[in-house]
Image (cartoon, helix red, strand yellow):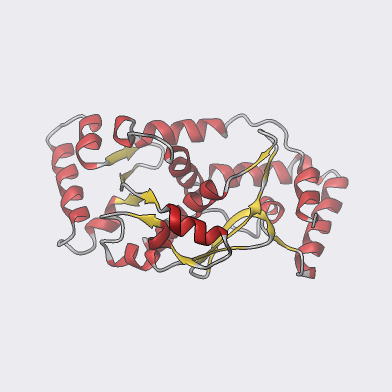
Amino acid sequence: MLLGLEAILSGSKATSLYRKAEKALDMVESGEPMGRVFRETGVDFIEDTNTFLMEVEYKLDKKAFSRLMEGKEVRLDDLIRSDELYDTEETAEAGGVMVQTADMVGAGFFIDGSISLGRGFFDPETGRFNTKQAMLIHEAQHAMQFVQDREFGSNPTTLYGMAYSMRNMDDPGNRKAARMLIGMIENGFEDKAMQDAYMIYLRSTGEVEANTVQARFNLKDRRSRGIEETYNEVLGDKVDLPKINFREIVERSLME
C-alpha cells in the first residue's frame, strides 16, 4: 500500500511510520540518492505529481479472503495484514472498512466507507476479466487515499465511470443509464466524449496510484524496484491507448 508522506508527518510522532518518514526526509536533505532512501525507508519521490509516497509492506490473508469469497463481509485489516499499515489514526480508520462481494458486473467500488467487489470487468486490451484479488488491492488503495484526504480515484458520474461502474441487475436506474450510454455511442458520442472520459479516468492521479499498487502486488521483493519506476510504467501504458469498444463494455454491464 502507498501512503502520502505529508499525511504521515502531520500525525502522531509515536508511530514507526512517522520515524521512517523523518529518516527519509533527513536522507533526502543530506543528498542521499532516492534509490537508497527507498531501500531503507520505503519512501520514493514521484516526479509526475511532485510528491513523496511511502510503500508499506502487507500480505493478503488467505483465510479471510476465502471467507470473503464465500459471501461473508470482512474487515479490510483482516484481509490485508500489516505490522505498520494501520499505525496512524487515519489508516486505522481504513482498516475498519468492510469488504463484500456483490453479484454485479464491474470491478470494484469504494464508497461510503465500504468496498464492494463485483464479478469483474471485461478488459478489452487482454480479453479477460480482472481477478478479485487485484480488485481488492486496487480498492484498498483508494480507501487509504480517502482517509489521508488525498485524490482517490475518478468520479463515477463521468461517462467512462458510468460505463465501467458495477451494474446491479435489480436496479432499474443502472439499466437505464447503461442503455443511455449505448444510445450515445450509436449516435457517434464514443469518438470524442467517451474517449476523453476514458483517458481522464485512467490518467487521474488516484487511479494511476491504485494501478501502481495493483501492479506491485505480486513483486517478490518490492524494495528492489522503486515506486516511481512502476508508477511511470503504469502512466506510460495509458498514453497511447487503442480505441476501446465501449458498446461491448456497456452491453456486458446489462448481462445477467
Query: Which residue is rendered at x = 80% and y = 63% of the image?
Result: 175
Q: Nearer the viewer, residue 80 or 178?
A: 80
The image shows residue 218 at horizontal and vertical percentages of 43, 37
Please state if 40 lies on the left or on the right of 81 as rendered: left
Q: Quadrant of residue 256?
A: bottom right
Please state if 163 lies on the left or on the right of 59 as rendered: right
Please state if 105 lies on the left or on the right of 23 as rendered: right
Q: Is residue 221 visible?
A: yes
The image shows residue 98 at horizontal and vertical percentages of 48, 68
Query: Which residue is rendered at x = 70% and y = 37% of the image?
Result: 124
Query: Which residue is rendered at x = 22% and y = 57% of the image?
Result: 9
The image shows residue 68 at horizontal and vertical percentages of 52, 61
Q: Nearer the viewer, residue 47 or 253?
A: 253
Q: Is residue 139 above or below residue 226?
A: below
Q: Is residue 23 above or below residue 174?
A: above
**Number of dots carrying numbers:** 0
Q: Quadrant of residue 40?
A: top left
Q: Is residue 151 visible?
A: no
The image shows residue 60 at horizontal and vertical percentages of 41, 50
